[in-house]
Amino acid sequence: MFESIGEVILLFWRALLALPQTWRQRQKVFEQFYEIGNASLLMVCILSFFIGAVIALQTGPVLVERSLSSAVGGVVGIAIAKELAPVMMAILIAGRIGSAMAAEIGSMRVYQEIDALRTMNINPIHYLVLPRMLAIALALPMLVVCAILVGWFGGAVVADMNHRMEIPFGSFFSDLRNIVVLKDVGNGVFKSFCFALIIGVVSCHQGLTTIGGPRGIGRSVTKAVVNSIVCIVIFDYLLTRFLLK
């Protein structure tokens, strides 16, 4: 376990040292960025809409019964912006993109394509790891911003249409603006950036350490997703404590 943690940290450090190579790898960064956004945007919108709807449906009637209808927009807004959007989108990307990264790099490792890159004097960190980490670090915060906006809209729709609340759109977003500040959204975006780095480095590490043929690729994909989600949850607590100071 501790050996794997050390290898992940070392891989992350090597990727940071490779940042000057970004311009040379810009085409691969763009390709990975497009793939992440194109593959995930629809799922992000659907998931975030219903997350906002569920939060409004669960908390709204309770607050309205206690004459706190003006707090519904703020509760939904803060819950989505600071916690639910970054965490849920990170888990979604870990399952959708992290697994694909681990499978692709793992296949290259098993079929000795990475050894062929080294033979041609091509650094696998520069060619494989750096573009994926940069692409996911750029794409996930953008997806989270989209998720926050769609989640707020989903909460507003439920608050307006549910007979136990009947909070108009204008009142919902007015209350949301009174409670949610730009710092709350910034906290969620910063979390998503950290989660993106975690997903990228963990998934790439699992791919680079794949052994054992097709069955080993399957194990690496599973480990990449599970380890990414565990790290996301742990770092979510640590980042929340840090950002609350």
Image (spheres, grey):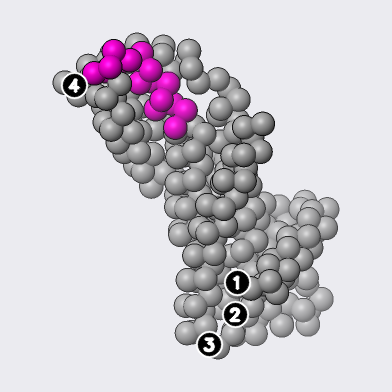
Which span of residues is magenta-colored?
Answer: 64-79
Could you tell which of marks 2 and 4 lies nearer the N-terminus? 4
Q: Secondary structure at mark 1?
A: helix
Single out the mark in the foreground, 3 or 1. 1
Q: Which residue is mark 4?
A: 164
- Residue in view at x 52 percent, y 83 percent: 216
Mark closer to the chain start, 3 or 1: 1
Figure disc tally = 4
Q: Residue at horizontal 36%, vertical 13%?
A: 70
Which of the image's four quarters has the N terminus?
bottom right
Mark 4: which secondary structure?
loop
The mark found on residue 210 in the picture is 2
> Are the two marked residues, 4 and 1, in contact with CB atoms closer than 8 angstroms?
no
Q: CA distance from mark 2 to mark 4?
A: 54 Å
Q: List the residue tagged with mark 1.
A: 206
Q: Nearer the viewer, mark 4 or mark 3?
A: 4
- Specify the farthest residue to the left: 163
Q: Is residue 69 magenta?
A: yes
Which of pointers 4 and 3 lies earlier in the amino acid sequence?
Answer: 4
Q: Amino acid at mark 4?
A: Arg
**Label 2, label 3: how many angstroms apart (C-alpha)?**
8 Å
Q: Quadrant of residue 140?
A: top right
Taking the spot 78% from the left edge, 60% from the top edge, the residue there is 13
* Residue of label 3: 213
Q: Amino acid at mark 2?
A: Thr
User: Mostly what secondary structure, the magenta segment?
Assistant: helix
Q: Residue 233: horizontal and vertical position, in percent?
A: 52, 52
- Dot 3 amino acid type: Gly
Is residue 173 in view from this perspective? no
Asked where in the image residue 182 lies, by quadrant, the reply is top right
